[in-house]
Image (cartoon, grey):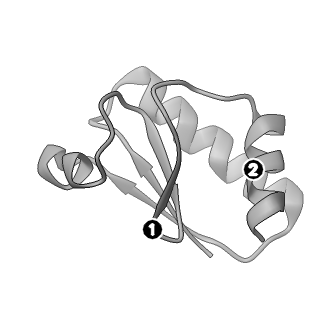
Amino acid sequence: MKIIVLGTGCKNCKTLEEYTKKAVEELGIDAQIEKEEDIQKIMAYGIMRTPGLVVDEKVVMSGKVPKVEEIKEMLSKIA
């Protein structure tokens, strides 16, 4: 599973990255987590607000920071 956290480096973007790493660790799934900060690449995903979360090239969330449990729920449905 490939997970990309979209965000330009703001506090919310960093928090989402931290929460995502924690969710992956708690679920014990094999996932590669990347952080994308290039605004042009972020815009290519079609999101209007950051942070965003992309799983296997599909945008699953944008514009908010979900709790770790919410991220785990999203990832469990995909994994």
Please determine whether, in this image, residue 70 is positioned above or below residue 6: above
What is the x, y in percent for residue 54? 49, 56
- Estimate how packed mark 1 is, as few (under 14), some (14 to 19) or many (20 or more) residues with alpha carbons within 10 Å: few
At mark 1, the secondary structure is loop
Residue closest to the eye, 8 or 79:
79
Q: Give the residue type at disc 2.
A: Met
Question: Which residue is pictured at 28% across the width and 46% down the height?
Answer: 46
As rendered, which of 45 and 33 lies closer to the eye?
45
* Residue 76, quarter of picture: bottom right
Secondary structure, mark 2, is helix
Give the quadrant of the C terminus. Answer: bottom right
Which residue in the rendered view is the most extreme toward the left? 40
Q: Residue under circle 1?
A: 57
Which residue is rendered at x = 87% and y = 60% of the image?
27
Residue topped by disc 2: 74
Asked if residue 51 lies left or right of residue 20, the reply is: left
